[in-house]
Structures are given as structure tokens and as C-alpha cells.
Amino acid sequence: MEENSRTIVSIRNLSKSYTRGDQIIPVLSDINFEIKDGEFIALMGPSGSGKSTLLNLIAGIDKADSGSIEIGGVEITALTESELAGWRAAHVGFIFQFYNLIPVLTAFENVELPLLLKDIGGKERRDHVELVLNLVGLSDRMDHYPNQLSGGQQQRVAIARAMVTDPTILVADEPTGDLDRASAEEVLNLMARMNNEFGKVIIMVTHDPRAAEKAHVIRHLEKGYLNDRA
């Protein structure tokens, strides 16, 4: 990673807690770090350490109690809910552990979904979808439904869906957690390719040290605090 790479994600004094009954449960405490253009970051730590909460805050799915998150020059912590929804659709690609594909839609239709929120024509949508399905090696499976695909193929469809809008960041929550080792390696290699060849910033939560090895930087969370090891 070049020293002069520009900062894409800047997190300052970020804290988050949840309320359970009359209890306030702190989840993240005074988190500070940056992610540079083109970086692949792995967030690791034991269950309950706040990894997925941090990922959801970066992705604009959840709101912080205090602190700021700036992504691509936009302070997302200052956006309204409707502004945040629009920002998220334009700038974040999501890759989930359980794929989150819609079973009644084909691979093509699942990948096309995020583009339906954009003001582009049918031919341009088709071109975008065919391009990313080809990139993930599934151009011959575009008319298949999720139940006709293996777990690894379904996750590759999910990666294509995440890439189709050309987002600023890709966020991945345990993307190999439901896959066998061979399929997991295939998916990780594909994510590394998206990072290396297309310069996508990737932020991945994982328990798997083998998955984390694909990242440029590994950050560790312990009981809501970010360990300074990187």
C-alpha cells in the first residue's frame, strides 16, 4: 500500500451502546482508525467484541451514539435516515454470510436488484449485470435460481450483486462462514481479485485466520476496544 494513498474511511471517537431493559450495554468504545484507498481490512475478535456492530456503522446500517464516520469525503454520521439510505445504495456493496439472495429470482435478477434503484435503462442494466456475472465466473448460470446453485456459487452471485453498482466500499460479514474450505478459498480469492484488480476497499469481519490472511491489515477488537495491533 502506497504511503500517500488517500484516506477513504476515517473513524473518530466512535462509541455505540445498546439498551436492554434498564441496562445500557456498551458495545464499542472510542474507536479511531483510518482505511486508505485500495486497502483490504479484516476485523477480528471473539464473539461479542463489536465486530459486526462496527461493520454496520461503517455501512450506514446502524447509527453511532457519538463520534464520526467519514467515507469518501461524506460524514455519514451527520446524514438523516433518508439521506443515509440514498448514500448506502450508491456507495456500499454488501456481502453476507448467508448470501441473502431472493429464492424466487434468478442469479441475473438478484444481481440486477440494486440497479433498479438507479435511473438507468434496461440495456445498461443488462450490460452491468452480465459484466459482473462474467467477472465472478457465472455467466453460464445467470438464469439459475439460488436453489440450483452451490453455496460457493451463491456467494459469488452475492459478490456480483455487491459489485454491480461500482460501490465505494465492500463490506463483508463472515463471507466464508457457511462454506466448505474449497468454496471459501474460491470466494476469498475472488474478493482479493476485486481488491487487487479493481481497487475496491474491502472491510471484512471474520473469525477465520485463513480468511484474514487475504487482507492487507488485520484489526482486532476486544470487548469493544480496538487493539492497536495492525
Image (cartoon, helix red, strand yellow):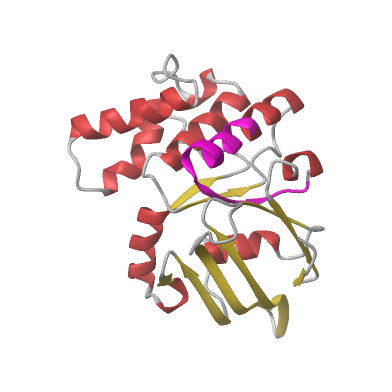
Nearest the viewer among 149 and 230 is 230
Residue found farthest to the top: 140
Q: Is residue 105 visible?
A: no
Image coordinates of residue 167 in percent, x first then y, are 41, 49
Q: Is residue 163 visible?
A: yes
Give the residue at x 73% y 40%: 211
Nearest the viewer among 192 and 18 is 192
Image coordinates of residue 202 in percent, x first then y, are 57, 49
Quadrant containing the C terminus is bottom right
Q: How many marks?
A: 0
Image coordinates of residue 198 in percent, x first then y, are 47, 40
Residue found farthest to the left: 121
The image shows residue 141, relative to residue 120, as above or below, that is above
Give the residue at x 79% y 58%: 45
172 displayed left or right of 111 = right
Verify whether residue 103 appears in magenta.
no
Nearest the viewer among 227 and 143 is 227
Quarter of image, res 156: top right
Image coordinates of residue 77 in percent, x first then y, are 47, 76
Quarter of image, res 145: top left
221 displayed left or right of 121 = right
Q: What is the span of residues highlighted in magenta in the rendered image?
A: 189-207
Give the residue at x 44% y 40%: 163
Give the residue at x 53% y 50%: 38
